[in-house]
Amino acid sequence: MKKQNKKAGYIVGLIILVALCVFGLFITTKGITKNKIGRASNIELGLDLAGGVSITYEVDGKNVSDSDMKDTVYKLQKRVEGYSTEAEVYRQGKDRINIEIPGVTDANKILDELGKPGNLTFVVPKEKKVKKNGKTTTQTTMETVLTGQNVKKAKAETNEDNTTGKKEYLVALEFDAKGTKAFAKATKEYKNKSIYIIYDNQIISAPTVNEVITNGECTITGMENYEAAENLASSIRIGSLPVKLKELRASVVSAKLGVNAIQTTVKAGIIGFVVVCAIMIGFYAVPGIISCIALAIYMLLTLLALNGFNATLTLPGLAGIVLGIGMAVDANVIIYARIQEEIASGKSVAASIKSGFSKAASAIVDGNVTTLIAVFVLWFKGSGTVKGFAQTLGMSVAISMFTALVISRFLVYACYQFGVRDAKFYGKPRTAHKHDFVKYGKRYAVIAGIIIIAGLAALPISKSRTGSLLNYDLEFSGGTSSTITFGNKQKIDDQLEKKITKVYEKVSKSSSVQSQKVKANHQLVIKSVELNLNQRKQLESTLKKDYKAKSVTTDNISSTISSEMQRDAIVSVIIATICMLIYIAIRFKDVKFGSSAIIALLNDVLIVFAAYSIGRLSVGGTFIACMLTVIGYSINSTIIIFDRIRENLKNIGKGQIKEVVNTSISQTLVRTINTTLTTFVMVLLLFILGVTSIKEFALTLMIGVVGGAFSSVFLTGPLWYFMKTKIGKEK
């Protein structure tokens, strides 16, 4: 009777799970309500995927009040809503404002308009008598009636004559209380005369006063078309900003590039999912099939979470989801490898399943918490696309823990309940062959040391050749990067590259112009010193007219931003490392665990750094994401080994520490290999199929994944053994 009740409970549970998955799949593909809420296609895309304009302004002035900043953000928000209803303006820190306008096409026009928040004044001519050379003459001066700060609203409108049907284009203005009073006085005094609207010392309009206006609202008529009315309203709105703004960073991204990025990354994810499933089924049989189901649910929940939390999906964020598939396998591998160990030790399948989940839980939680530490640091210290990567990776980690510890657990027990009880269904138990990893640790340390020294030695060599220690990307060096996309018939050869480079040298008046052909995407990437908006517009016009370029996307970053990003990169890695050290020390109640882990992490960071140094890879914003992802991934493997060492200390005995270390590493070796393999496959596919901007990121992650696996196996355990036996009271 009890067994029947259990079976009935699992049947109900499976029905509920299937129903929830079907409902979740329906929401993801179709959405609910008229607005299609929850549909995957409605996930908010970052500018690098949706295309558009991103710009960062710094307020020009030291004594800018909070109210001035709020007014500026509000007025800019109203301004950009005219370009896109999804445009967003938000304050960053004390004196910066970020603007993001997705989906727009005429980006340079927007940058031109937003980049000129100059002084706006309403003036009237004032005549006065002055004596000059003994003669009295009349001198006309311009007297300010009110300024742009007194303008509350400026909007283009269209009126239609009810009799004739003729359309009239006008600009409707609304003033604040001070402006209303001043404008009433001026219109009374200057009725039937003109009031001049001056923007940056140029007259942009000179409307005639037809009547006295006392209610603070008026219209400027006589516009030849709606576009002229909108241009005038736009100038008044921009000119009414209470502060002056200085452009620090501007990015223009083609929507077509974003679509291509999504397609290639999703393709990498699908292929990677199939390969990972094949590996899991091959190693773990029925639990492997269950892990594939759990992974599919993980992907579904991730899409729902992106919608539910209104997260913005960026290109690195998309890569984070794909990487998360590889990392999500880790929890399943830990559990199923543990079940196989328990079966191999002679326990029944039921007891092995129970023991496997119980013993794996602490290792899974500890490993993922350390990864989340890196995610939180990326979130708080990163910006833009790095923040997007942190957000999606954080979601991936949390959801993968849930699917492994809840969904997988339920499905494994359900399978057992419905008759899948033979040990052969859980994969062939693997005997852990012991190796002297403590001895191998010395050899690995020598090899790693040679790689690290080579990486450090490459720095002065690069400095002497190129004038820079590392190949700093735009985000770390400042300047302008242009991605020029040509048609399929255009041949991108050395001759074309040389001609375009000369065009950039001429416009930028600098010889420090770098170029790179990306034949796979039919593109040419040009990096130069920082160019102003007029120079960028001139280049785009020349490239489209003379060289038949289809599109030109630009990224412009000032040296102020780049120096801050360099500082944030260093601070981020230091903060993450300290937080991990504290967590491990508390969790394992032994600072030697934390110390050996941090030394191994330093090794991993320096190995990846050597790849950047020797390979002259671009060091930019994703450099931070790469380093912290490697740290989080590597510490995960280290935690698994330390967790096993802690367990074996109770079983083997504290007097045989070398035996404990070698046994623990041997027992977790299969898990390390399998997890490294699945994660490596996902990142490799990102490297092969991904767009240019993600390839170097994927390359360094591959190096970090392999390096992290080796250091976890050959360095952390031996280091802990050395500290335990050679340092302190237990020597």
Image (cartoon, rainbow, N blue to C red):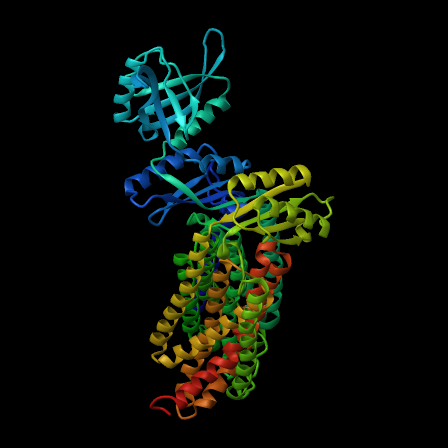
Where does residue 193 sit, x and y in percent of width and height? 36, 13
In the rendered view, would you say 681 is above or below 156?
Answer: below
Q: Quadrant of residue 420?
A: bottom right
Where does residue 69 sit, x and y in percent of width and height? 32, 41
Q: Quadrant of residue 177?
A: top left
Q: Quadrant of residue 98?
A: top left
Where does residue 474 sit, x and y in percent of width and height? 52, 54
In the rendered view, would you say 213 is above or below 420?
Answer: above
Q: Residue furthest top?
A: 163
Q: How many marks?
A: 0
Where does residue 504 sit, x and y in percent of width and height? 61, 46
Near-viewer residue (308 or 173)? 173
Q: Quadrant of the N terminus?
A: bottom left
**Is 673 left or right of 99, judged from the image as shown?**
right
Near-viewer residue (59 or 318)? 59
Q: Quadrant of the C terminus?
A: bottom left
Near-viewer residue (237 or 209)? 209
In the rendered view, would you say 259 is above or below 198?
Answer: below
Give me the residue at 66% from left, 53% from top: 518
